[in-house]
Image (spheres, rainbow, N blue to C red):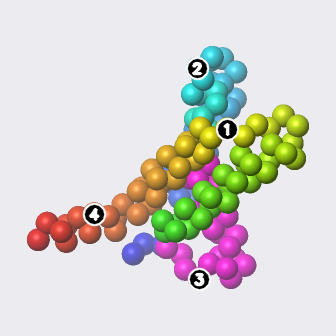
Amino acid sequence: MNSFRYFRDRLFLISCGLYAVNRWLIKPHVRNAFMRGHFDDLLLIPCALPLLLLAQRWLGLRAHDQPPSSSEIAFHLVVWSILFEVIGPHLMRRATGDPWDVVAYVGGGILAGLWWNRKGLRAALRANEL
């Protein structure tokens, strides 16, 4: 299996670029609720998880350089959802807890997980065809 490239991962780079374009070029000029409120939330996992996993690797908390597993993605989804949507609104005056943000985090996490593990998924599908 190929080594995960962390901050050089293609999905990470594309997602961070999309975040920047939306934040500074699109959001200020559109009234679309999805683009203003949830598009960036879809990008949480593909933008943040690679860097966090790299930090965990450097600290010895992650023992391999494989793509993020479904359990790693799910764990960080739960932690970030609680932190950003439950705890955050109590600590930051302008923050609000929004369950639709969690739906977007999960959707982005599922799509990212499928992308990062696409080679293993293809192999599993081929094995089931036999």
Please check the rendered image and state whether residue 114 is part of the magenta-colored stretch, yes or no: no
Residue 4 showing in the rendered view: no
The reply to whether callout 2 and callout 4 are in contact (CB within 8 Å) is: no
Q: Which residue is mark 2?
A: 32
Tell me where residue 68 appears, x and y as whole percent: 52, 67
In the rendered structure, which amino acid carries the disc numbered 1?
Asp
Q: Which mark is residue 63?
A: 3
Question: Which residue shows up at 70% across the image and 70% down it?
Answer: 55
Vertical position of residue 109 compared to residue 95: above or below: below
Q: Real-space Cα distance between discs 4 and 3?
A: 25 Å
Looking at the image, is mark 1 or mark 2 nearer the viewer?
A: 1
Tell me where residue 11 appears, x and y as whole percent: 51, 52
Question: Which residue shows up at 54% across the image and 75% down it?
Answer: 65
Looking at the image, is mark 3 or mark 2 nearer the viewer?
A: 2
Q: Real-space Cα distance between discs 2 and 4?
A: 36 Å
Q: Real-space Cα distance between discs 3 and 1?
A: 34 Å
Disc 2 on helix, strand or loop? Answer: loop
Q: Which mark is residue 98?
A: 1
Q: Which residue is mark 4?
A: 122
Which mark is first along the chain, 1 or 3? 3
Q: In the displayed structure, does residue 65 sit left or right of residue 87?
A: left
In the rendered structure, which amino acid carries the disc numbered 2?
Asn
Tell me where residue 89 appears, x and y as whole percent: 80, 43
Binning the other alpha carbons within 10 Å of mark 4 as few (below 14), some (14 to 19) or many (20 upward) gives few
**Quadrant for the N terminus in the image:** bottom left
Q: Which residues are magenta?
A: 43-67
Vertical position of residue 34 compared to residue 52: above or below: above
Please check the rendered image and state whether residue 55 is part of the magenta-colored stretch, yes or no: yes
Disc 4 on helix, strand or loop? Answer: helix
